């Protein structure tokens, strides 16, 4: 059998990758990696950078290139066969990761290289990260603890995958058919057309609502039928739990409990007090007290104001619409009404100005002006779905710097949310010269009724956000994958480029590049732009405390885990809500059961990173406010000190090199309309 996953001659041959390729390809690659590691560690003489570290970087890269399409396809075109193949491989990957991390010969090899002179700062950073990671993999533990570490890692990787599967299955399982269009009163035409299209695709009459975000969000924001909003709210908020329409069917309760217990045990094995401490071992933040103080400081600035915003909303709903009690399923609906009332602007009104075929080239024009890049589409590149597009990035000198796939629209069997992931790393050694390739995945409203996809302004922001991650990955000039692009960047600094790029969705000069009316091509009218800007910080304190709630909850369940008392997930969530939430959900709500960022993504005891990095990104953008949003020197500074440097130096040092000083919280508070 020819195995498409072992074809490393160019981009992954997606259309030829089959589920039955997955396990044999991984087995072959791991066997090869093991043999080469054995040869490298057995070699005579003192290990050197070129003779030892570079071959290991190439080895890691081979495994990453083989596995990347598998993880990616599992996320974007999930199927039973692929899922099964993926899950068979997780314990093998986890076992290999632990084995390498605990390989004392390898560890000594890195130590020997690290002791040598004539290394540059990137090489030193890579080595210090590597030595740190050996410790975090248990290289210095006694044998019995090492094998326990391995068991825990394997079980955790299976559990986090199970958590994501439960959530995806539960999301797919619910739908609601509307027979009479009157039942959709209030919904914009775009949402109705999507519901109609979904019904047609599944061979059903009428309109079909689902829990995919482009369907769910308009229901919560616009549906006049309060009972429908409540029903959708309950279905969404109880996914993969013991409550709601599929109670107990894909229940994550035990999965979460076990994940927390194992993370705690793993942290203690390594000598940490808890998993929050373990998480911070690789981050910018120094210790749990600093993280809590940071979040509580933001809370102090915003909770009162958020309460005021909620009171104002409740009063508006009562006075204008006769609503006695504002419930959670009323929040988006009346917020949208209040926004309309106050600013005469809503997401739907902006949509016609953001057809995706205008936004994309516009966004490329923005980064061309900012960073001197040219981005062009390449036709007929093999992919996993007809909607996928492929682009390449060249710099001012014409050199090919990176390539990326864009998979823009929501569909069944595709994981929700938006993300950037690595397809290929930059690798530049004597033996290899490889440019970085990224996946940009979004879940935008698909084109309906033969019209192009029209994005909401939120979706435009999401696109800029993910593209910011993509630029960080693709513009890197670092030669070694372990610290190139987003690799080796502390998790609480990794959102700097992404959140930074969102700012260009709000400036007049850049809006003119990305907006154009779908029918006439007309620019966004001044009047509409002014209203959009003035609505920017609408309910910003409520949004702030919502993020603080998630961050504190995530951090505290990992910090306060107690083996005797268990995870106490909802006790801690309640306590956090007492502290920062302005509206509490009903008792049936099961937020944590669907909080995939921390239970199946990489944000465990790290969700605070969004806010942490937002301090950096807001402060970075403040320089452009001072000098002009397309100031060439500021753009070059950001490209050279942040985007091109990846994880090759301490995140704080890179920020200071760009900004000339350490970050302050002021710009974030000012941008959020929350004065210091
Ligand atoms: Zn991000």
Image (cartoon, helix red, strand yellow):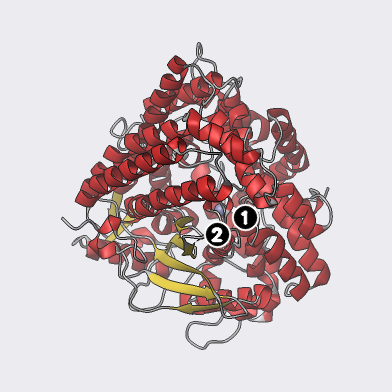
The structure residue drawn at horizontal position 72% and vertical position 70%, both measured from the top left corner, is 636
Apparent side of residue 225 relative to residue 487 in the rendered image (left or right): left
Residue 503 horizontal/vertical position (percent) = 67, 64
In terms of depth relative to the viewer, which is nearer, 337 or 209? 209
Apparent side of residue 248 relative to residue 640 in the rendered image (left or right): left
- Disc 2: which residue: 473
The quadrant of the image that shows the N terminus is bottom left
- Looking at the image, can residue 137 be seen? yes
Q: Callout 2: helix, strand or loop?
A: helix
Rounded to the nearest angstrom, the CA distance separating label 1 from label 2 is 8 Å
Note whether 520 is above or below 436 in the view shown. below
- Check the image and name the residue furthest to the front: 45
Q: Callout 1: helix, strand or loop?
A: loop
Note whether 45 is above or below 340 in the view shown. above
- Looking at the image, can residue 542 be seen? no
In terms of depth relative to the viewer, which is nearer, 523 or 116? 116
In terms of depth relative to the viewer, which is nearer, 535 or 32? 32
Task: Give me the disc on residue 376.
Answer: none
């Amino acid at each position: 059998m020819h195995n498409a996953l072992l074809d490393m001659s160019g981009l992954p041959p997606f259309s030829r990758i089959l589920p039955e390729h997955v396990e044999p390809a991984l087995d072959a690659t791991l066997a090869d990696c093991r043999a080469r590691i054995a040869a490298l560690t057995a070699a005579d003489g003192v290990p050197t950078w070129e003779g030892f570290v570079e071959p290991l970087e190439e080895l890691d890269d081979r495994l990453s290139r083989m596995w990347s399409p598998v993880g990616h396809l599992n996320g974007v075109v999930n199927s039973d066969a692929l899922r099964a193949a993926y899950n068979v491989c997780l314990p093998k990957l986890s076992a290999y990761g632990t084995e390498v991390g605990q390989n004392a010969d390898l560890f000594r090899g890195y130590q020997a290289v690290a002791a040598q002179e004539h290394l540059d700062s990137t090489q030193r950073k890579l080595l210090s990260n590597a030595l740190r990671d050996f410790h975090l993999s248990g290289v210095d533990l006694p044998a019995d603890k090492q094998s326990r570490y391995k068991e825990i890692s394997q079980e955790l990787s299976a559990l986090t995958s199970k958590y994501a599967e439960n959530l995806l299955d539960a999301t797919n399982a619910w739908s609601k058919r509307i027979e009479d269009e009157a039942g959709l009163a209030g919904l914009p035409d775009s949402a109705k057309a999507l519901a109609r299209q979904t019904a047609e695709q599944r061979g059903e009459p009428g309109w079909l609502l689902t829990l995919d975000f482009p369907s769910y969000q308009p229901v919560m924001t616009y549906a006049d039928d309060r009972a429908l909003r409540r029903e959708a709210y309950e279905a969404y908020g109880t996914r993969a739990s013991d409550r709601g329409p599929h109670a107990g069917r894909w229940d994550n309760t035990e999965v979460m409990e076990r994940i927390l217990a194992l993370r705690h045990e793993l942290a203690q094995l390594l000598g940490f007090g808890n998993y929050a401490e373990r998480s911070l071992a690789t981050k910018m933040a120094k210790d749990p007290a600093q993280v809590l103080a940071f979040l509580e400081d933001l809370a102090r600035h915003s909770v009162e104001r958020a309460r005021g915003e909620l009171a104002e909303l409740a009063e508006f709903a009562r006075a204008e619409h006769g609503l006695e009690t504002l419930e959670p399923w009323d929040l988006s609906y009346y917020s949208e009404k209040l926004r309309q009332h106050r600013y005469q602007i809503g997401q739907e009104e902006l949509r016609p100005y953001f057809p995706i075929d205008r936004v994309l080239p516009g966004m490329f024009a923005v980064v061309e002006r900012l960073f001197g890049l040219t981005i062009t589409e390449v036709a007929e590149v093999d992919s996993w779905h007809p909607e996928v597009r492929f682009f390449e990035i060249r710099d001012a000198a014409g050199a090919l710097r990176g390539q990326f796939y864009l998979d823009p629209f929501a569909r069944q069997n595709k994981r929700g949310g938006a993300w950037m992931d690595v397809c290929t790393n930059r690798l530049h050694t004597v033996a290899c010269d490889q440019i970085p390739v990224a996946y940009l995945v979004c879940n935008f409203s698909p084109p309906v009724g033969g019209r192009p996809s029209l994005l909401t302004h939120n979706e435009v922001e999401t696109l800029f956000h993910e593209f910011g991650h993509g630029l960080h990955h693709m513009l890197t000039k670092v030669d070694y994958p372990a610290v190139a692009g987003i690799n080796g960047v502390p998790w609480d600094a990794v959102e700097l480029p992404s959140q930074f790029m969102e700012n260009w969705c709000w400036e007049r000069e850049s809006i003119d590049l990305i907006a154009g009316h779908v029918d006439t091509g007309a620019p966004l009218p001044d009047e509409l732009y002014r209203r959009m800007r003035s609505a920017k910080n609408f309910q910003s304190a409520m949004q702030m405390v919502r993020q603080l709630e998630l961050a504190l909850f995530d951090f505290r369940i990992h910090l306060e885990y107690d083996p005797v008392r268990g995870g106490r997930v909802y006790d801690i969530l309640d306590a956090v809500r007492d502290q920062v939430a302005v509206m509490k959900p009903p008792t049936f709500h099961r937020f944590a059961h669907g909080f995939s960022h921390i239970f199946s993504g990489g944000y465990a005891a790290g969700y605070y990173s969004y806010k942490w990095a937002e301090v950096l990104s807001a402060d970075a953008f403040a320089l452009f406010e001072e000098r002009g949003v397309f100031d060439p020197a500021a753009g070059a500074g950001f490209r050279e000190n942040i985007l091109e440097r990846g994880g090759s130096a301490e995140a704080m040092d890179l920020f200071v090199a760009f900004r000339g000083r350490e970050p302050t919280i002021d710009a974030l508070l000012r941008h959020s309309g929350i004065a210091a």
